[in-house]
Image (spheres, rainbow, N blue to C red):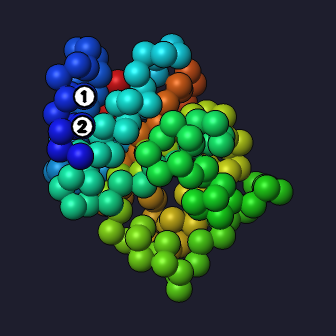
Amino acid sequence: MATLVNKQRTIFNPDQAAAFDAVLESVTNNQGHIFFIHATGGCGKTSLCNTIAAKVRKRGQIALCVASSGIAALLLDGERTSHSHFKISLSIYEDSVAGLKRNSYMFLVLQQTKIIIWDEVPMQHKYDIDAVDQCLRDLLKVSNCYESPREERVSHAFKHLISNIKSYNGVKI
């Protein structure tokens, strides 16, 4: 894993290197920033996110990687969709909450998680993101998960910020 991280870091372009450094600084210092990484297809966003996850895991910390579609999940370390990982219902409504439970193994993992990387998040319905947000607030007992220093969110392909996160103090890269 250390070899992968070091090799990838040396071939990043300046923007990828800046994003990598900024995310890891936030994780290291428990700053809780939200990062949105936007670039055209084939620019190395997934590689960047896999390298960030590998670096966090190299430190012995937990990095959760999920994607909005099965195809995107196949390219991301962990190969899990957000629906599978967070137990998001396929029938989603404005007041829905993801199905994670306090007595589950996943709850224990979330308590120790340093970073959540959510690939292709703009492809998710707003209610899916809200359902995960509400579930994390309930489970982790924080008023706003986007302000929790325990977790970072890294997502790809954001052209427009989703309405429920546009007012948070994240760093846009």
Q: Is residue 49 above or below residue 55?
A: above
Residue wearing tag 2: 4
Q: Nearer the viewer, residue 85 or 170?
A: 85
The answer to whether mark 2 and mark 1 are in CB contact below 8 A is yes
Q: Is residue 107 visible to us here?
A: yes
In the drawing, does residue 118 fall left or right of residue 100?
left
Picture quadrant of residue 35: top left
Circle number at residue 8: 1
Q: Residue at x 37, y 39 (%)?
A: 50
Question: Which image quadrant for residue 95?
Answer: bottom right
Please report the residue visible at 59 percent of the width from the left and 72 percent of the height from the top.
100
69 above or below 18? Answer: below
Residue at image position (83%, 57%) is 91
Question: Which three-letter amino acid code belongs to the residue tagged 1?
Answer: Gln
Q: Residue at x 17, y 23 (%)?
A: 10
Q: Percent position (x, y) of residue 96?
A: 73, 62
Neighbours of disc 2 within 10 Å: few (<14), some (14-19), many (20+): few
On the image, the x and y values in percent for residue 98 come to 65, 64
Could you tell me how far apart the alpha carbons at marks 2 and 1 are, in whole angstroms? 6 Å
User: Taking 22 as reference, is 89 above or below it?
Assistant: below
Q: Nearer the viewer, residue 20 or 128?
A: 20
